[in-house]
Amino acid sequence: MFIVLLKFSDNKAKAGQFMDGHKAWLKRGFDDGIFLMSGSLKPQLGGGIMAHNTSREALEARVNDDPFVTHGIVVPEIIEIEPSQRQPQLEGLFG
């Protein structure tokens, strides 16, 4: 399980130019069954994604394909979590 933080850089003002590509990139992540959740980091710090069903190396490659990353709009950070406790309703997420 991974948390991906996409923190705005000094190029934040250019985000609108690449928003359509970023949204298409997010959609591919959901369609591929990798992304579980995405949303904004508050207050206006960037975005975050919860991901699973992938290796760290594959996720790094996927994140590096995000137009926001390739154009320097955000700086990515990937945090890997190995869950040891969880709510029973989440059992299906952990193979």
Image: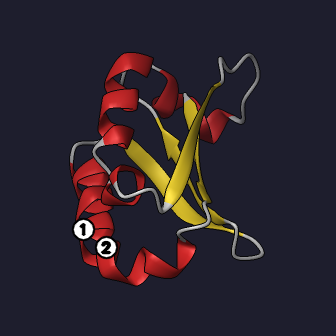
The amino acid sitting under disc 2 is Phe
Determine which quarter of the picture holds residue 86: top right
Secondary structure of the residue carrying tag 1 is helix
Where does the image place residue 13, in percent across and percent down from the top left? 52, 81
Q: Amino acid at mark 1?
A: Gly
**Is 9 on the left or on the right of 42, as rendered?**
left
* Residue beneath disc 1: 21
**Front position in the image: 87 or 28:** 28
- In the rendered image, the vertical position of residue 39 relative to residue 64, given as above or below: below
Q: Is residue 43 left or right of residue 38?
A: right
**Residue found farthest to the front:** 10
Residue at figure coordinates x 31%, y 30% from the top left: 61
Q: Quadrant of the N terminus?
A: top right
Quadrant location of residue 16? bottom left
Q: CA distance from mark 2 to mark 1?
A: 5 Å
- Residue at 45% across, 48% down: 36
Q: Residues within 10 Å of mark 1 (few under 14, many from 20)?
A: some
Q: Is residue 31 visible?
A: yes
Which residue in the structure is indicated by mark 2?
A: 18
Which residue does the image show at 60% across and 60% down from the upper left? 9
Question: Percent position (x, y) of residue 72?
Answer: 45, 56
Left or right, 92 with respect to 85, comes to: left
